[in-house]
């Protein structure tokens, strides 16, 4: 059964379903709640294809039920231009849904890439997951 998710164009959903059948996903996504803040833990890579699409799909599923989200990048060992584009799309989707997004704990190589592309001026990046959660927890009513 295919579920159409808000924010994902039909062609993108079809591509995601096709790629899922053809390859193994090299990204695991775990979701938890920490005192009203949704924590999305990523392990693996965020790259062109199924990984970037899977992350976008999972966050889109969470948006109707959360106002505060932390994307834990501590387990991400690689990100390419499609992955960076997906992070920007996540920022735009969360903002449109009145959800505040913070990236947390990127490894040094990922941090350098975020700075090099000037995404640190757009995306809120915290050095640790605890720091990101604490900054959002202050706003949870």
Image: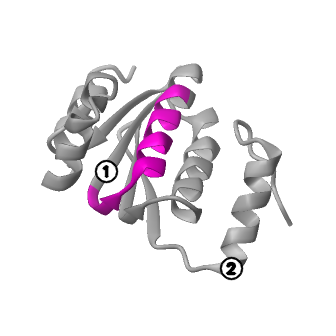
Q: Name the residue under label 2.
A: 22
Give the residue at x 50% y 37%: 90
Quarter of the image where one finds residue 38: top left
- The span from disc 2 to disc 1 (Cα, nearest Å) is 27 Å
Q: In which quarter of the image is the N terminus?
A: bottom right
Residue 48 or residue 72, whichever sits in front: 48
Give the residue at x 33% y 19%: 139
**Residue 107 showing in the rendered view:** no
Indicate whether residue 79 is drawn in magenta: yes
Classify mark 1: helix, strand or loop. Answer: strand
Residue 62 or residue 17, whichever sits in front: 17
The relative height of residue 11 versus residue 91 in the rendered view (above or below) is below
Give the residue at x 56% y 80%: 24
Numbered range of the magenta stretch: 74-92
The relative height of residue 55 versus residue 135 in the rendered view (above or below) is below
Q: Name the residue under label 1.
A: 72
Measured as percent of width and height from the top left, residue 83 is found at: 44, 50
């Amino acid at each position: 059964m295919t579920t159409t998710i808000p924010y994902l164009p039909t062609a993108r959903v079809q591509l995601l379903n096709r790629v899922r059948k053809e390859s193994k996903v090299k990204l695991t996504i775990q979701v938890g709640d920490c005192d009203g803040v949704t924590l999305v833990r990523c392990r693996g890579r965020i790259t062109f294809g199924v990984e970037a699409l899977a992350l976008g799909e999972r966050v889109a599923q969470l948006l109707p039920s959360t106002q505060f989200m932390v994307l834990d990048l501590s387990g991400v060992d690689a990100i390419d231009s499609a992955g960076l584009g997906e992070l920007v799309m996540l920022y735009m989707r969360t903002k449109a849904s009145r959800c505040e997004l913070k990236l947390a704990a990127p490894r040094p190589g990922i941090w350098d890439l975020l700075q090099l592309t000037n995404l640190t001026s757009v995306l809120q990046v915290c050095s640790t997951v605890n720091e990101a959660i604490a900054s959002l927890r202050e706003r949870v009513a």
